[in-house]
Image (cartoon, rainbow, N blue to C red):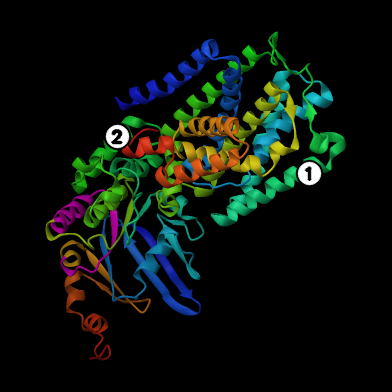
Amino acid sequence: MTARYYWGLHLGLIALLFAGHFVLPAYQHGNVARIMVLAVYAMGYNIAFGYTGLLSLGHAMFFGAGMYGMGLLSYHFDAGALPAMAAGIVAGVVLSLVVGLLALRTAGVSFMIVTLMFSQALAMTLVYFRDITRGDEGFVIPSATRRLWGMDLSDEAHRYLIAWALFSVVLIFTLWLVRHRWGRVFVALRENEERASLLGYDAFRTKLGALVISGTISALSGAAYALLFGYAGATFAGVQYSIFPLLWVLLGGAGTVLGPFVGALFMFYLIDLSSGVTDAYMLIAGVALVLLTLFLPHGLVGEVKRRLWRDLP
Amino acid sequence: MSVILQTRGLSRSFSGLPAVHEVDFDLPQHEIRALIGPNGAGKTTFVSMLIGRLPPSSGSITFEGRDVTALPAPKRVGLGMAYTFQITSVFGKLTCHENVALAAMRRLGGDAKAVEAEVREALTRVGLADRAADVAGDLSYGHQRLLEIAMGLAQRPRLLILDEPTQGLAESEIADFKALIRALKAETTILLIEHNMSVVMELADRVTVLNFGEVLAEGTPQGIHASRAVQAAYLGTGTEEA
């Protein structure tokens, strides 16, 4: 019964965003396309942090791995969109597996530091090998890659629809995953790892699985971001891009399927609107964030879940 | 009757202090065994080694003929051992239903109907069926203990280790608990750490007494009750000959 309601809610958002393609003014249309791709990143992050309780400070490495896995194949080998995207995803799978095998030997604060360290190492590597990666400058994705099934991906309409399709697939996947027993074991580990182990669940393997899913979705987002918006740069692998998904997820509601999108949307427009008012827009954004943390500590969707709809996934 | 669990020379010391020392222990199938002893006798250390929360310093553990000494806890649970915590350790933010479902899911996998049936049965057996939708952390202490037991039942273990299950239960709940354990005897083997003597006397087939990490006595509840050595250990007066 309740399943019908939450499927309705999530599919409703997808339908709403599809309708947005036809009604949004050009500027908002572009913004929402960008937000949907970033929300995919946040949804990936949420699987590790929100559901499994793995507070990573280095997810930019996965976003960056996807972006550069896709971008380098395109830049150096003129690969088509699909092989380039595949390379980005493979880079995400491999990196999250390797980092997971090492970093998950730690927990809590150590895990935060180890992930931060790995991420910084990747960002430095990207800057260091400038012959291959073009260093700080980054590079523009060649137009040969930015074509898919006859569509020009630099075209705003195509860009929006592809971002929408990607967002929808990841949203539905997340909703499915967290209702599946795997997702429920993720939550069990977040809540009480020792108890979960003594119910027979292998904590290390489960967390590794969660991190690989999370890192791969983050990489998918990074690859799509470069493909759709045409640029890859080392800033996207920097510490700032590790903090963004954490902020979005916290604002929207950790451990809720809709939270990452709501958080990304809110943060994007908070900065967008406040920068229209004053140059000191970070001050306004900062105060708004402090107020939200004070009064809605579970995030926007998190509060709805806590107060009104307890079994919202 | 075949032996389901056996330890040989099982020892564990903490910074040189022996908590459990050279324990040889045999538990036949379908027996209800009580493990008693004064505070600090090493009961919880002993069962923690059995389930794999704590590695032994030396000795071996055999479960259903298989040496499990080196197996991590989740693997032992997979073989059919289950453990309920002394200090309640339920998933406080999840509902009772979800707590028990997590216990049942590992064995039943993705079969949602079977999990549902198992959850309902386990909650009914401990008398929490009407609390299924309640958040576990909001339950009274006694009810959280019962939820722990339901999580043990839902695993359908071949060996169920209960660490002080009746602590914090009301008298009426203890009576229900006794009936529940008696009913379980046909299905499983039970190792019970217990302080409540009426529970031990009424439920246990045999009793093992630990004192200073060693087996002090083993026998029928009546025999143990009458033993002077046990009384001396509990009351702490005089020597074993007293």
Residue at numbered disc 1: A125
Amino acid at dot 2: Glu
Q: What's drawn in magenta, residue-wise? A: B173-198
Q: Position of residue B178 (x, y in %)?
A: 17, 57
Residue under the point 26% across and 55% down: B145
Number of marks in picture: 2
Residue B225, located in which quarter of the rendered image? bottom left
Q: Quadrant of the C terminus of chain B?
A: bottom left
> In 3D space, how far apart are the residues under numbered discs 1 and 2 (Cα atoms)?
51 Å
Q: Secondary structure at mark 2?
A: helix
- The reply, left or right, for residue A148 in relation to residue B115 is right
Q: Nearer the viewer, residue A155 or B3?
A: A155
- The reply, left or right, for residue B24 in relation to residue A133 is left
Up/down of B114 relative to B81, above or below: above
- The reply, left or right, for residue B200 in relation to residue B137 is left
Q: Quadrant of the N terminus of chain B?
A: bottom left
Q: Secondary structure at mark 1?
A: helix
Q: Position of residue A264 (x, y in %)?
A: 54, 32
Is the residue at mark 1 from the same chain as the one at mark 2?
no
Query: Residue B184 in magenta?
Result: yes
Q: Position of residue A20 (x, y in %)?
A: 51, 15
Q: Chain of mark 2?
A: B
Q: Nearer the viewer, residue B236 or A73?
A: A73
Structural crowding at the residue carrying mark 2, measured as other residues with C-alpha within 10 Å and reported as few (<14), some (14–19) or many (≥20):
some
Amino acid at dot 1: Thr
Up/down of B230 relative to B87, above or below: below
Residue B116, numbered circle: 2
Structural crowding at the residue carrying mark 1, measured as other residues with C-alpha within 10 Å and reported as few (<14), some (14–19) or many (≥20):
some
Residue under the point 33% across and 54% down: B159
Residue B141 in sight = yes
Q: Chain of mark 1?
A: A
